[in-house]
Structures are given as C-alpha cells and as structure tokens.
Amino acid sequence: MILTYLTLAAIAIVVLVLVVYLVGIAYYLNRADQHLVKLVGGLQAIQGHARPLPEHLGTINGALKALRGDLQETDRHLEGVGKMLERE
C-alpha cells in the first residue's frame, strides 16, 4: 500500500515538473513570437524605405565618378607643383 502511494507521488511530481517546464516553454515561445512580429514589421519598413535606393544610387554613382575625375586631375596638378618646387 505504501509503495502505491510513493509511486503515485513520484508520478505526480514528474507530471508537475513537466507541466512547469511546458508552461515555461509556451511562455517563452509566445514572447519569441511577439518579438518576431515586431522584427517582421521592422523589416517590412526597411524594405519600403530601401525601394527607391536603386534610382538614387545611380545618380550618386554618376556624381561620384565626376568627383573622382576632378580629384584625379587636382592630384596631377599638385604632383606637377610638387615637382616644380623640388627643382627650385
């Protein structure tokens, strides 16, 4: 008779521990789901903001190419000035 009560107590403890762990898992899965919903909303906002970038990047790239050419020309002029100053 005492073995029956001990067995039932052990089973109750195991079931109780399992319930606590499963409730904890369900709680943290629910929190993760809420964070994922926020993440998806943020990623959709980023996608919306990034949509016009290809048009602007083409313009920026063209302006940077022109600036690069001007800077290379300035560099050549400064090299010439440096060589002239070395001679004197």
Image (spheres, helix red, strand yellow):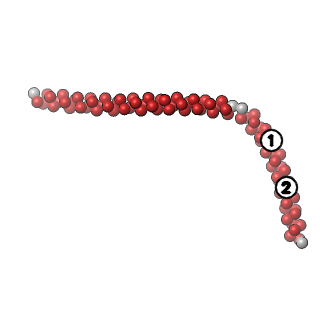
Q: Quadrant of residue 20?
A: top left
Please, what secondary structure does the residue beneath circle 1 have? Answer: helix
Residue in the foreground of this view, choosing between 27 and 5 = 27
Task: Inspect the image, locate mark 1, and give the three-letter code of the amino acid beneath it.
Answer: Gly
Picture coordinates of residue 21, whole percent (x, y): 33, 32
Q: Quadrant of the C terminus?
A: bottom right
Q: Report which residue position mark 2 lands on.
A: 74
Picture coordinates of residue 48, whole percent (x, y): 66, 30
Bin the neighbour count of mark 2 within 10 Å (Cα to Cα): few under 14, some 14-19, many 20 and up.
Answer: few
Q: Is residue 4 left or right of residue 34?
A: left
| Figure label count | 2
Q: Report which residue position mark 1 lands on.
A: 62
Q: Is residue 37 left or right of residue 82?
A: left
Marks 2 and 1, the one that precedes in the sequence: 1
Q: Residue at x 58, y 32 (%)?
A: 42
Task: Inspect the image, locate mark 2, and give the three-letter code of the amino acid beneath it.
Answer: Thr
Q: Residue at x 87, y 63 (%)?
A: 81
- What separation in Å lies between label 2 and label 1 (alpha carbons)? 19 Å
